[in-house]
Amino acid sequence: MNEDILTRVQSNPKFKELVHKRTRLGWQLSILMLAIYYGFILVLAFAPDVLGASLSGGTTTVGIPVGIFIIISAFVLTGIYVRKANTEFDQLNQQIVEDAKQ
């Protein structure tokens, strides 16, 4: 019986849609986060004076808000994924479960 349910779930077009959408979103957000992070590392490696420049003549440098931006962007991108998972992906998942029970 479990093999039958597994076969029905895997052959369901909604399951294929769910896997495709979830994978695509995961890759998009991962690439965006990697671009942000490695962009920071590349600037740090090849133009450290940019991040070391003072913002207002004091001790705070450009690197501080950039670093804060990187941390916040990780939280925001995670929030985007969670929101999408809790709305669209959960609805598709529920429809797949209901179809498999029939």
Image (spheres, rainbow, N blue to C red):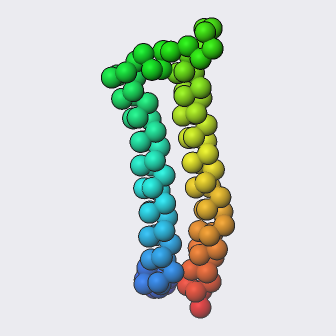
Q: Residue furthest top?
A: 58
User: Left or right: where does residue 30 sit relative to residue 62?
Assistant: left
Q: Residue at x 61, y 37 (%)?
A: 72
Give the x, y percent position of residue 71.
57, 33
Give the x, y percent position of residue 99.
58, 86
Q: Residue furthest left?
A: 46
Could one spot residue 44 in this view of the protein? yes
Q: Nearer the viewer, residue 68 or 99?
A: 68
Q: Residue furthest front?
A: 57
User: Left or right: where does residue 63 sit relative to residue 10?
Assistant: right
> With respect to residue 83, does 53 lie above or below?
above
Give the x, y percent position of residue 40.
43, 30
Q: Nearer the viewer, residue 34 or 61?
A: 61
Could one spot residue 97 in this view of the protein? no
Q: Residue at x 58, y 55 (%)?
A: 81
**Number of numbered discs:** 0
> With respect to residue 60, does 40 lie above or below?
below
Give the x, y percent position of residue 84.
61, 62
> With respect to residue 49, does 35 lie above or below?
below
Query: Quarter-wise, where is residue 27 in the image?
Result: bottom left
Can you say which quadrant of the picture contains the C terminus?
Answer: bottom right
Q: Nearer the viewer, residue 99 or 14?
A: 14
